[in-house]
Amino acid sequence: MDRNQDNIRNFCIIAHIDHGKSTLADRILELTSTVALRDMEDQLLDNMDIERERGITIKARAVRLLYTADDGNEYIFNLIDTPGHVDFNYEVSRSLAACEGAVLVVDASQGIEAQTLANTYLAIEHNLEVVPVVNKIDLPSADPERVCGEVESVIGIPAMDAPRISAKHGTNVKEVLEKVVREVPCPSGDPSAPLKALIFDSYYDSYKGVIIYVRVVDGTVNVGDTIRLMATGAEFTVVEAGYMGAVDLVNAGKLCAGEVGYIAASIKSIGETKVGDTVTNAENPCDEPLPGYREVNPMVFSGIYPADGAKYGDLREALEKLQLNDAALSFEPETSAALGFGFRCGFLGLLHMEIIQERLEREYNLDLVTTAPSVIYKVTLTSGETVFIDNPSNYPDPGVIATAEEPMVKASILAPSDYVGSIMDLCQERRGIFKDMKYLDETRVELHYELPLNEIVYDFFDALKSRTRGYASFDYEFMGYAPSKLVKLDILLNGDVVDALSFIVHTDKAYLRARKIAEKLKENIPRQLFEVPIQAAIGGKVIARETVKAMRKDVLAKCYGGDITRKKKLLEKQKEGKKRMRQLGTVEVPQEAFMAVLKLDE
Amino acid sequence: MSKGLYIHVPFCRRKCLYCDFYSVTDFSLSDSYVNAVIRNIKARGERYDTVYFGGGTPSLLSGRQVYAILSAADIESCAEISAECNPDSADINKLSELHSAGINRISLGIQSLDDRELKMLGRLHDSAQAVLAVKNARASGFDNISADLMLGLPFQNIETVKSNISRLSELEINHISAYMLKVEENTPLAEKTELVSNIADDELSADIYLSAVELLEEKDFYQYEISNFSHRGYECRHNLKYWKCEDYFGTGPSAHSCIDGKRFAVPKDICGYIYSERQQEIITDENACSDEERLMLSLRLAEGCPIPENGGERIIKAAKELQRHGLLNISDNRIMLTPKGFLVSNSIICLLSEAMEE
C-alpha cells in the first residue's frame, strides 16, 4: 500500500438532524464500493438501534474508503462520523481534531439550522476546510440558490459552487467526493518523528479488549511496539494496527502519519483509554501530548434502581458492560429506603442519561426506576469540612451548613434574532446571569449566559428548542462553583418521606417546584384503597399539598360457580399489574411517576 | 359430605340486554335436554343437600320435567331446592307445579320495580307483574322467596334506588340479591351508548351501594355477602357453597363444577350436551380451593375469612392499615370487610393475598 500522505483525505460530515448525513454517508460507501450493495443496510454508520430510531449519532465512528478520482489517482478517504448533541460536545471536538476537512450538509429547502452552526464553527476553530453541500434538491420546495447564499452570509465561506445533490437518489454525490479530493488538504505529519496519535474514540470488544480509534499525527506505530497513553501513563504492546473497513477491522500491521485507524493492544479497561488522550511510543516518546485533552467528568447524577429488586445483580452486570464502551458513565452502589438497592450513576448530561437508561431497558431487558437528576453540590460545614453531595438524600442538615455552592456553566446560545426575547425569558427563569450578546449577521445572534447547572439538567434544552422552534443551538462548559441559597425539598407520601424523590433546589424556586411536583404526582399516582396526601416540605414545613382521593369502587358484584375461575384470573392479572408499582410505605407508586417529576415543563 | 347440584337451564323466551349467560330460544329441545340432565345426574351419582336451577329461565320447564330431574338425584330430605323464575312466567299454575315438583325456594328476577327501568333493561315483565309474582309464589306454598334487584342502572340515583328497595321490602320475601350492573362485553347493552353513558360513575355507584346496604339492613335484610341480603336464617345455602369452597356438581351447557379441588366446565353447546352420553367436562383449574382462592371467596362474606396460618402476621399488619380506614374489621381471628370495603374488595383481596404470599 502506498503510504504517501498526499493521497489521504480525512474528513467528517456535519449536518442538522434529518438533513441527510447518514444517507450521504451510505451513498459514499456505495460509490467507493466499500460495501457490496447487497450488504447495504440503511444508515450503516449508525449501528446502535437507538441511534437509528432517534436519528442521532451517539458515539463517533469511522470508516476507511478507497476512491479513484477523475485525475486517475486512488485516494484513501477516512470518513469520521460525529455526534451532534451538546452532551457529546467533547467527542465532537475530538473527532474534528482528527480531520482536515468537514463536509457541511445543508437541506435545500430548510437552509442552515442552528445545530449545524455550532459544529461548523467548531470545525473552523480546528482549522478544518469546510466543504458545503446542498442536499435534497429532489424536493419540490428545494431552493439551492437561496441556501447557498445563506451559507455564505451566515458562515462566511464561499458556497456558490457547492455541489447540489440528492443523497437519496445518488444525484451528484460523486461531485462531493471530487471536492473532497480537491479542497480538503492532505495530512502533513512527519512519519519519522516520534509517534504522536490522537485517540478520538474507543470501544470494548470481548475478544480483543479495548479497540482505540486513532489519528496518527506524527510517526508510525507497528504491531509489537510498546505504546504509552500519555494522560494515564499506561503502557501496552500493540497486537493489531490497521484500518476500519465498513464491516470489519482490517489489520494492516502498522499505521503511519496522516492515517486514521485502530489499535488493539489487549487493553482491559476503557477507563485507561481516554478520548482526547495522546498515544506515543514508550521507547521513543514525543515531547508533549497533543493539545486539547481534558478529563470528561460526569455532570449529572441520578439513582438507577431495578423495578424488581431481584434484578440488582443483572443491573450491575449491565452497567459494567455499558461502561466498557462508555468511559463517561460512572456508577456506584447506593441504597434507598424507598427503592431498595441500586446505583448512583454519573452522566455527561440529560440525553446521555436517557440513552443509558434506554439501553439498559432495551439491550438488557431491565425495568428501571430512575430518580430525579442532581448535580454535585459543594457544601462547607460549620466544622470547616467541605463535602461534595451528588445525592440529595445525603444533603446535610441546614443547621450544620456554613455555605453551600452549586456548579455554574458558561452557556452560549446561537439563534435567529427573532427569538432573543424568549431566550432571555427562559434564561431569566433559570436564574441565568446575562454576560453579552453579539450579532453574527443581521439575523443571527449569539448570547452568553452564566447558568447554574442544576437549572439546565432537567429540561433546559427541550425548553430552549420549543421556544425557538428548534432554531437555537446550545453549548456549555463548566466554569466553577458559586455560592447559592439552596434548600432540600422532601416529598412525603401518606406522611412518609420518599428519599428517592428528594432534591435540592434554589430557595426562590422551591415553592413553584414543590407545587408542580405535587401536581404531577397527583396525576400519576392512581387511586389507592385510602386517601393519600402528597406533601412537599422543607425541613418540617409543608409548602405544597395535594391529595389522591381514595378509590371508591373495585368489585366484582356477581361471583357464583361459573365465575370463580374467571375471577381468579382477573385477580392474578390485577396482582401482575401491581408488580409494576413501587411500594413506598403504604402507597403504591407507578414507575412513570418517578419519570413524570423530571418533566415539569410539559 | 353432601354436595351442591347446579342445573343450568339454557332456555329463554328472549335475551335481556345486559345478560351474558348462555341461553337459546328453541324450547323444542327441552325434552331431550331434560333426558340429558337425568343421564348426567345418574352417571355422577352424588348425594346433594342443595339444588339450584339457574339459567336461562328455569321456570320455562314444566313441573313434570323438574320432577323428573329431581327424582333422578339422591337428595337429602331437608335439602334447599331453588329455582330462578322470571316474573313474566310466574303465574300461579306454573309456581304451584314447581312447588309440587319439589322446589322449595324461588328466586324471582324482579330487578326493579320501576317500569321505565324494566323496559330499558329489555325485561318482559312490568312492576305489577313483579308484585303479582311474589303473591302467586306465596299462594303456591313458597315460604322462601328471593328477589333480584339491580343497582346502578342508567339514570338511577340514590332516591330511585331507595324507593325501589322500600317497595320491594314491603313484599313478602325473605331474601334479596342486589347487584351492581356491570356492562359485559358482547351484550346488546354494551352497544347502547346512550344508556351506557348514563350509568352511574364509580362515585355515584358507590354511594348507591352504601345507601342500599343501609336501607336493606333497616328493613331487616342483613348483608351476608357482597350482593346478598336476607332475613336471618334465609341465606341461600347453595350459593354459600361457592364462597366457602365446598363441592358442587354442575350439569347443563355452560355449567361449572368444583369437585375434589378441581374446577371444570361444560361447553356452551346445547346440542353437544343433548347428544353426548355424558357431558364433556373441560378442566378450568387444577388447583381450586387454594389458600388464596379461599381468601378471595370468603372475603365476599360478611362473616369474613379466618386469618390463615400461612403469613398470618403479614396479613394482620396489612389488614390493620385497612381497618384504620374503615375498610374491614378484625375480630375473633377473622377479617371481615365492611360495606365500604366490599366496594373495593378486588383491591383488598389483591393486597391481602400478596401479604400472604410474601
Image (cartoon, coloured by chain):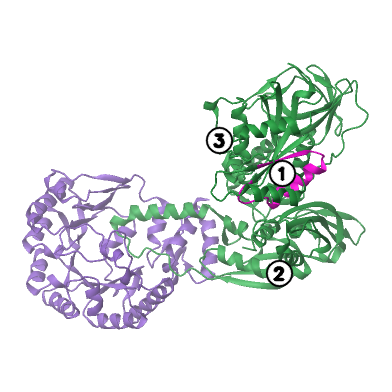
Where the C terminus of chain A falls, by quadrant?
bottom right
Q: Which residues are magenta?
A: A107-133
CB within 8 Å, label 2 to label 3: no
Q: CA distance from mark 2 to mark 3?
A: 52 Å
Colour purple maps to chain: B
Q: Which residue is mark 3?
A: A42
Please state which amino acid type lies under the numbered disc 2. Ala
Give the side of residue A440 with respect to residue B96, left or right.
Answer: right
Examine the rendering and report whether any part of residue B179 can be seen: no
Taking A140 as reference, is A198 left or right?
Answer: right
Q: Which chain is green?
A: A
Residue picked out by circle 2: A537
- Place of residue A546 in the rendered image (x, y in percent of width and height, measured from the top left): 61, 72
The residue at the point 46 percent across, 57 percent down is B350
Query: Of callouts 2 and 3, which one flags the residue occurring earlier in the amino acid sequence?
Result: 3
Badge 2 and badge 1 in a common chain: yes
Q: Nearer the viewer, residue B331 or A3?
A: A3
| Of the pair A552 and B260, the residue shown nearer to us | A552
**Dot 1: what SS?**
loop
Q: In the image, which is nearer the foreground, mark 1 or mark 3?
A: 1
Q: Amino acid at mark 1?
A: Ala
On the image, which quarter does residue A425 sit in?
bottom right
Q: Residues within 10 Å of mark 1 (few under 14, many from 20)?
A: many
2 or 1: mark nearer the eye: 1
Q: Compared to A383, does A78 lie above or below?
A: above
- On the image, numbered disc 1 is attached to which residue? A159
